[in-house]
Amino acid sequence: MISVDEDLCVGCAMCVPYCPEDAISCYGQAHINENCIDCLACLEYCPVEALKETVLEN
Amino acid sequence: MTPKRCDVLVIGSGMGGLCAAALLSQAGYHTLVAERLPRIGGRCSTIEYKGFKCAAGAIGPEMGGLLEETFRQVGAEFDVRPAGPPSYLINGKICEVPPKGGFRKLFAAATSDEAELERVMGAISGALSWMEPSRTTSLREWLLQYTQNESILSIFQAMVSATTMLNASELPAREYFLFLKKLRGYRGFGFCPQGSIALPRALAAVIEKHGGAIWTRAPAVQIITNNRIARGAVIKKEGEEIEIHASAVISNCGPGRTVQLVGKQHIDQGYLKELNTDVRAVMLIAIQLATDKPLLDHNYLIVTGARRINALFQPTNVCPEIAPPGKHLLVAGAAPASTAPPLNARAELDLCFQDLRDLLPGFEEHAEVLLTGTFHGQWPAMHAWPGDDMSLKTPIVNLYNVGDGVKSPGMIALPAVAETARLVAEDIKMRLAPAA
Ligand SMILES: Cc1cc2nc3c(=O)[nH]c(=O)nc-3n(C[C@H](O)[C@H](O)[C@H](O)COP(=O)(O)OP(=O)(O)OC[C@H]3O[C@@H](n4cnc5c(N)ncnc54)[C@H](O)[C@@H]3O)c2cc1C
Ligand code: SF4
Ligand code: SF4
């Protein structure tokens, strides 16, 4: 799943348009909501590498 | 993988990197630009969203200055339409500014005290024609010597925060007057009908025409040095790390990141100290709205006396191409109360939205918020406050910085960035010959 590194995210909203599911909102920092389908499309558009793919261990 | 070679390796495809690469490839240097993001232009680019060409950073490039001159010189198309002069909102009334005598007209809208007006005008004309004030006082402190009038002070606050992106209480008075002299207060700018990305695209076409290359999704992960001389960089591309050897390396990723790519242990102590103590990022808030009717009569309105908003742009007045038919794009700019971190982003944004409701009748019914962006830290309005910039050269021989962390005094934003590229390109042409 995708997560926002709060120490890095500057809230520039540059990732928002790249999400096909409207799953990112940005107000000071990016927030990923439950619509996220983990397509990772947003990942490479963050200019400060604040979007991370976190691998859940089970 | 075997190392590749080029004359000049440019790290980052912002306007600084691309202007430098275009100038050098035109002069016969084999040039490679490596950009980390999938899109070129850095903070002068465009993102298509809901049918709008939204700004990824700069919205109003200067016309008739060093930026346009650089495009002319390399033969790149400069697709920018004039925005016209700004209008001002002062004490709830619109004030249009004539090409000459603008200050007088603005202050006359703010005070009826003739003596006060003459005092301020006298001080300004002295600072412009004789000597700039000290860089130890802020513009606000300097002004307070001549007027306590809050309306006049708020005209300056809006004017400088909309252009230099610092508050009047932060901007050194000296920088403001240098800015007025060098950039004429940033009056002549325009909007790009195809979005700001038209500018980096035009430069990229020039670079490719001269045999250079632009790689996207290609971050530099290390700058290679040997005995304090730059030898190239390691670029990550399609999962591989590629060593690129070059006679000169130009970094466009900000002086702080450049040092990280070299490794602090290779950098002069004094340089590091300067970087850590003097260089602060400029913060900015930009809110982009889609509206179904024009909410603004103006292309560019400088807003005085609001909580946070200092400027409103409606680029669709002159460039309807930016929005779907019948729609408008409205961009609001704001400076946080303090440009010193940490930024209380939510509180600052709340104040911006209160302003928008007050400033734009019909905001609730006719505006949809497209993007609410705060720019600071590693993705700022500018990498250094005007007047606090690092030098173009780094302590590593043949490693240069370009961009808005290495501006010259009085210069801001895109024209400043173009100037850094021109100076670096000139220095390289003087010092290093292209490989045959
Ligand atoms: C919201 C906003 C509005 C603005 N409005 C205006 C305006 O109206 N007019 C104006 O003149 N200026 C404006 N500015 C300022 C202007 O956008 C910037 O000064 C200018 O675009 C900066 O250019 P640059 O070349 O210095 O850096 P950037 O544009 O930041 O370019 C640097 C590039 O380097 C890349 N990079 C970073 N690290 C690496 C790496 N390791 N490897 C490879 N690539 C890397 C980045 O991805 C980026 O593309 C605005 C800025 C913002 C944020
Ligand atoms: S991973 Fe895909 S769905 Fe999830 S936020 Fe990013 S772009 Fe949207
Ligand atoms: S692009 Fe990156 S820094 Fe900008 S809002 Fe999205 S996650 Fe945050």
Image: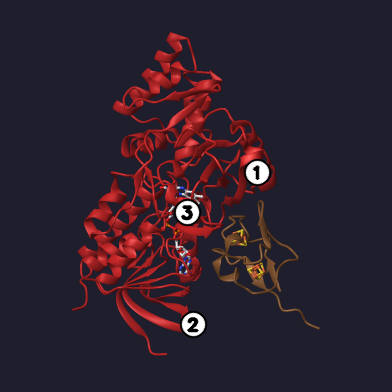
Chain colours: A brown, B red
Q: Residue furthest left?
A: B436
Mark 3, residue position: B274
Q: Is residue B333 left or right of residue B432?
A: right
Secondary structure under tag 2 reads loop
Q: Quadrant of residue B133?
A: top left
Q: Which mark is on residue B238?
A: 2
State the image coordinates of residue B424 (x, y, percent, origin top left). Answer: 30, 59
Name the subunit of mark 2.
B
Q: Residue at x 44, y 63 (%)?
A: B268
Q: Residue at x 61, y 43 (%)?
A: B367
Name the subunit of mark 1.
B
- Does any portion of residue B275 appear in the rendered image? yes
Q: Residue furthest bottom?
A: B1
- In front of the other: label 3 or label 2? 2
Q: Is residue B199 left or right of residue B258?
A: left
State the image coordinates of residue B369 (x, y, percent, origin top left). Answer: 62, 48
State the image coordinates of residue B157 (x, y, percent, origin top left). Answer: 51, 31
Q: Which mark is on residue B349?
A: 1
Question: Hey, what amino acid is under mark 2?
Answer: Glu
Q: CA distance from mark 1 to mark 3?
A: 32 Å
